């Protein structure tokens, strides 16, 4: 199974955000076992770095990015993808960029806790818990 994770899923793991960290840990454990292939929009990296640095300092943020890159492959967004996201029916541009990255990566699903924000996405949207169940079943 191939899935693109939303920024919030990565932050749940890296910042150990309760009550979401357990689902994120299970998802990343499946990635470590090779049972799920995780992707991440490249534009999420700077957001993740900023939020981790704000919470735990720059050194921790650098370590968090290194750790994250052990588990995910980033999906770059080119000019055309950005323009498609900008014209998307998804209201939030950040969410539209994530959905566009998911389409570009040809993933099976987009994994997020914000399923409502992706209601207009042209790709299946799963919560981390749902993605874990599907990946374990394969």
Image (cartoon, helix red, strand yellow):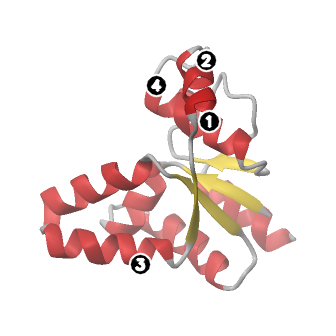
SS assignment at label 3 = helix
The span from disc 3 to disc 2 (Cα, nearest Å) is 32 Å
Q: Earlier in the sequence, mark 2 or mark 4?
A: 2
Residue at the disc numbered 2: 88
Look at 48% across and 72% down and name the residue there. Answer: 69
Question: Please, is residue 60 above or below residue 52 in the view?
Answer: below
Residue 71 quadrant: bottom right
The span from disc 4 to disc 1 (Cα, nearest Å) is 10 Å
Task: Give neighbour class at mark 4: few <14, some 14-19, many 20+ (Cα, 10 Å).
Answer: some
* Quadrant for the N terminus in the image: bottom right
Extreme-front residue of the structure? 79
Look at 84% across and 70% down and name the residue there. Answer: 137
Relative horizontal placement of residue 87, taking residue 123 as reference (left or right): left
SS assignment at label 1 = helix
Q: Nearer the viewer, residue 65 or 119?
A: 65
Task: Give neighbour class at mark 1: few <14, some 14-19, many 20+ (Cα, 10 Å).
Answer: many
Quick check: marks 2 and 4 in contact, CB under 8 Å? no
């Amino acid at each position: 199974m191939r899935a693109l994770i939303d920024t919030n899923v990565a932050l749940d793991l890296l910042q150990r955000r309760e009550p979401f960290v357990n689902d994120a840990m299970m998802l990343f454990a499946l990635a470590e076992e090779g049972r799920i292939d995780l992707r991440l929009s490249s534009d999420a990296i700077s957001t993740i770095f900023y939020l981790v640095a704000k919470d735990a300092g720059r050194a921790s943020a650098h370590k968090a990015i290194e750790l994250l890159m052990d588990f995910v492959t980033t999906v770059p967004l080119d000019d055309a993808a950005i323009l498609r996201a900008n014209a998307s029916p998804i209201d939030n541009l950040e969410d539209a960029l994530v959905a566009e990255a998911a389409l570009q990566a040809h993933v099976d699903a987009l994994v997020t806790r914000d399923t409502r924000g992706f209601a207009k996405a042209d790709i299946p949207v799963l919560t981390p818990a749902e993605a874990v169940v599907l990946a374990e079943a394969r």
